[in-house]
């Protein structure tokens, strides 16, 4: 069963420390429910969720499980509307103990969100 909350369409590693992803924002997405009637805007948590999905998906392709545990410097600079297509750029640095992901969500060449997510590898 497809996750109705997922907007992510494509994820790929472009270099050793970079992930690129694409997401579509359909008008009928449940993210818009109540946010806001007559003036739909994608909630900021949905943008963070897209980034989280891209990080987890790329890690799983490499056989790595991650636990995301910290958000820092999260900024939402422009609204995202129904029908928008987003590109996500994620750079990361593995310090051995933590992995620091810095991201930008872009809509039509404009950064709509940015920030950092910190994760740990799960042994198992």
Image: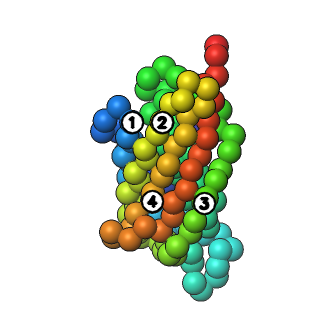
**Residue at image mark 1:** 17
Can you give x and y, in whole percent of width and height, for residue 56 in the image?
Answer: 53, 36
Q: Is residue 106 left or right of residue 60?
A: left
Q: Quadrant of the C terminus?
A: top right
Name the residue tied to disc 2.
93
Q: Residue at x 54, y 29 (%)?
A: 95
Q: Residue at x 51, y 64 (%)?
A: 113
Residue tagged by mark 3?
74
The local secondary structure at tag 2 comes to strand
| Residue at the top extreme, as displayed | 124
C-beta proximity under 8 Å, tags 3 and 4: no
Question: Circle 2: is it few (<14), some (14-19), or many (20+) Cα within 10 Å?
Answer: some
In x, y percent, where is residue 61?
A: 43, 26
Mark 2 and mark 3 lie on one chain; the one further toward the N terminus is: 3
Q: Looking at the image, is mark 4 or mark 2 earlier in the sequence? A: 2
The numbered mark, 4 or 1, whose residue comes first in the sequence reads 1
């Amino acid at each position: 069963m497809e996750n109705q909350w997922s907007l992510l369409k494509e994820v790929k590693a472009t270099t050793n420390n970079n992930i690129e992803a694409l997401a579509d924002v359909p008008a009928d997405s449940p993210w818009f429910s109540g946010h806001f009637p007559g003036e739909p805007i994608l909630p900021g948590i949905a943008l963070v969720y897209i980034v989280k999905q891209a990080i987890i998906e790329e890690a799983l392709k490499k056989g790595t499980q991650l636990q995301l545990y910290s958000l820092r410097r999260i900024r939402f600079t422009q609204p995202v509307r129904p029908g928008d297509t987003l590109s996500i750029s994620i750079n990361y640095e593995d310090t051995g103990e933590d992995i620091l992901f810095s991201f930008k969500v872009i809509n039509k060449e404009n950064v709509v969100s940015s920030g950092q997510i910190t994760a740990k590898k799960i042994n198992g």
